[in-house]
Image (cartoon, rainbow, N blue to C red):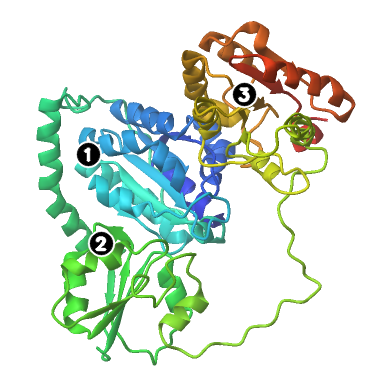
């Protein structure tokens, strides 16, 4: 087949499609969003009617994927690194239930936090769950690994993690496709108790998972994605994981004659690790993210072998790798780079002109100016930019859904007023349970659900709660008289401030829904 020019995300999506995919589940989160989006618009996926809609959150997505696997079909579930925290319960337990049809959990990490609230390395979850993982070094490997991972998943009846990072997810390269496979026929698990985690079953399943580990290590030792390149200079060897291998290749030539171990499949290949550790005086570990491999090497260390990497300060603990930092770690002379022209000025992120959140924050600021700052708890979304000038309207942002629950805790501590701002999509993701807590506790808070009719920050995906927010709030138990819908426009400022003040004065749970289309969605529809 002809080559396709694909993002790393798209290469994973195409690899899954060509391997006989029946369903894709996920929640949008940069840098993973394009995996599901590619499947949604792919003509072959549309023709085959492959399931390809967004889920309410990452946990529900993974559980739906496990349901499809139970029926014998191949499925992929996608998320960013912090999304795996949300799905951790189902991910950890999936190691015991295993898979029937192949399951791939594609997780995109975001070193340097380009669009995230923390740095996190999803390989730790794979190690924690004792599940295999792949880490591609380029787009072709991303495609090949995803295509082949389904076979490994079904061979051992285990979910497989596909871990990539921002630079690979969002860069393009030519990708050659394989012969397209047919979808699996529906089939139920041979063992009726496979997906039943009663404690008596779970103990046996955990032991089986432990017993499988040596076989998974052998798979890694024989994997084409774990390559050992020998060298004559044994003073220093290099272990390069995933994308870090590309950065290494950019900095060395044929004259550099030291051993290199390229890692693309986990668990770590023990034989190759022991070989490079035994042969070399010191070993430099290049890995994108956290020092997982570097820490694990302590179990392989022969006497006298020095390990260099993020832990000893050779490479910074924070931030992503790049060719320049790898070059410095190798002890090579720095290559001068051109200065950035002074005409290029950094532009901080800001709410778009015409954004409905601007008018909402103007109303909130009118209310809180009497009591000062420290009263508005916010959430994950483009509206988090309300913290920045000129609005300075919000005070916290921790994780998805934390605005409502933090407002509850602050109100319990005696803070008044206690206001939460949350987007419509985030409310559907993890805010509903917080509102249920508020109703149950009769918390004295105002919850502002900022409804712009889309998941704007990640590319205009549909929100799971579109058209149902008032009914959800009513069903949870919010008093109908205190579910207020407003239109955030400058001309409505005085009226909106009056409504906000009325709900602040009410002793109980209030929900205000400022509703107006995201300005980009509005332009698109018009």
Left of 348 or right of it: where is 112?
left
Crowdedness of circle 1 by 10 Å Cα count: few (<14), some, many (20+)? many
* Distance in Å between CA atoms under marks 2 and 1: 18 Å
Viewer-proximal residue among 39 and 199: 199
Please give the residue where the numbered disc 3 appears in the rendered image: 447
* Residue at left offset 56%, top offset 60%: 171
- In the displayed structure, would residue 172 be above or below residue 180? below
Tally of numbered tags: 3
**Mark found first going from the N terminus, 2 or 1:** 1
* Residue at left offset 77%, top offset 67%: 345
Left of 301 or right of it: where is 102?
right
Viewer-proximal residue among 269 and 380: 380
Residue 468: % across, % down: 61, 16
Query: SS of the residue at dot 1?
Result: loop
Please give the residue where the numbered disc 1 appears in the rendered image: 157
**Mark found first going from the N terminus, 1 or 3:** 1
Query: SS of the residue at dot 3?
Result: strand
């Amino acid at each position: 087949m002809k080559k396709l020019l694909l993002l790393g995300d798209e290469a994973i999506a195409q690899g899954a499609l060509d391997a006989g995919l029946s369903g894709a589940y996920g929640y949008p989160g940069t840098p993973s969003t394009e995996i599901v989006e590619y499947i949604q618009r792919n003509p072959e996926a549309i023709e085959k009617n492959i399931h390809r809609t967004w889920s309410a959150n990452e946990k529900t997505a993974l559980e739906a994927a496990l349901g499809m696997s139970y029926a014998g079909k191949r499925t992929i579930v996608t998320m960013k690194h912090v999304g795996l925290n949300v799905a951790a319960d189902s991910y950890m337990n999936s190691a015991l239930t295993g898979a029937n049809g192949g399951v791939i959990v594609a997780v995109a990490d975001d070193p340097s936090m380009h669009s995230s609230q923390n740095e996190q390395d999803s390989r730790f979850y794979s190690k924690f769950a004792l599940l295999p993982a792949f880490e591609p070094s380029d787009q072709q490997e991303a495609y090949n690994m995803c295509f082949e991972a389904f076979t490994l998943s079904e061979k051992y009846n285990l979910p497989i993690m596909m871990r990539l990072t921002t630079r690979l997810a969002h860069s393009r390269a030519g990708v050659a496709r394989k012969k397209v496979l047919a979808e699996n026929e529906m089939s139920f698990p041979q063992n009726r108790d496979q997906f039943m985690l009663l404690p008596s079953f779970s103990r046996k399943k955990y032991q089986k998972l432990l017993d499988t580990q040596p076989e998974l290590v052998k798979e890694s030792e024989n994997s084409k994605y774990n390559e050992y390149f020998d060298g004559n200079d044994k003073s220093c060897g290099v272990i390069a994981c995933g994308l870090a291998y590309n950065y290494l290749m950019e900095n060395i030539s044929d004259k550099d004659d030291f051993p290199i171990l390229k890692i693309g499949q986990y668990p770590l290949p023990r034989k190759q690790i022991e070989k490079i550790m035994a042969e070399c005086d010191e070993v430099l570990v290049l890995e994108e993210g956290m020092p997982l491999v570097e820490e694990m090497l302590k179990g392989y260390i022969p006497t006298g072998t020095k390990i260099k990497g993020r832990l000893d300060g050779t490479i910074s603990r924070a931030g992503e790798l790049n060719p320049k930092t790898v070059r410095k770690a190798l002890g090579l002379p720095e290559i001068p780079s051109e200065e950035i022209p002074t005409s290029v000025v950094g532009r901080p992120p800001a709410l778009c002109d015409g954004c409905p959140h601007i008018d909402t924050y103007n109303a909130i600021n009118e209310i809180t100016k009497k009591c000062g700052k420290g009263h508005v708890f916010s959430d994950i979304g483009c509206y988090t930019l309300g913290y920045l000038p000129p609005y300075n309207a919000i005070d916290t942002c921790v994780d998805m859904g934390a605005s409502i629950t933090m407002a509850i805790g602050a109100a319990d501590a005696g803070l008044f007023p206690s206001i939460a701002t949350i987007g419509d999509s985030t409310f559907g993701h993890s805010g509903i349970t917080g509102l249920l807590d508020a109703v149950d506790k009769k918390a004295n808070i105002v919850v502002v659900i900022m409804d712009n009719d889309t998941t704007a920050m990640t590319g205009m995906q549909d929100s799971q709660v579109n058209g149902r927010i008032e009914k959800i709030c009513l069903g949870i138990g919010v008093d109908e008289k205190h579910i207020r819908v407003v239109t955030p426009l400058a001309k409505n400022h005085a009226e909106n401030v009056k409504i906000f003040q009325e709900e602040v004065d009410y002793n109980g749970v209030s929900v205000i829904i400022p509703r107006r289309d995201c300005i980009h969605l509005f332009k698109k529809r018009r």
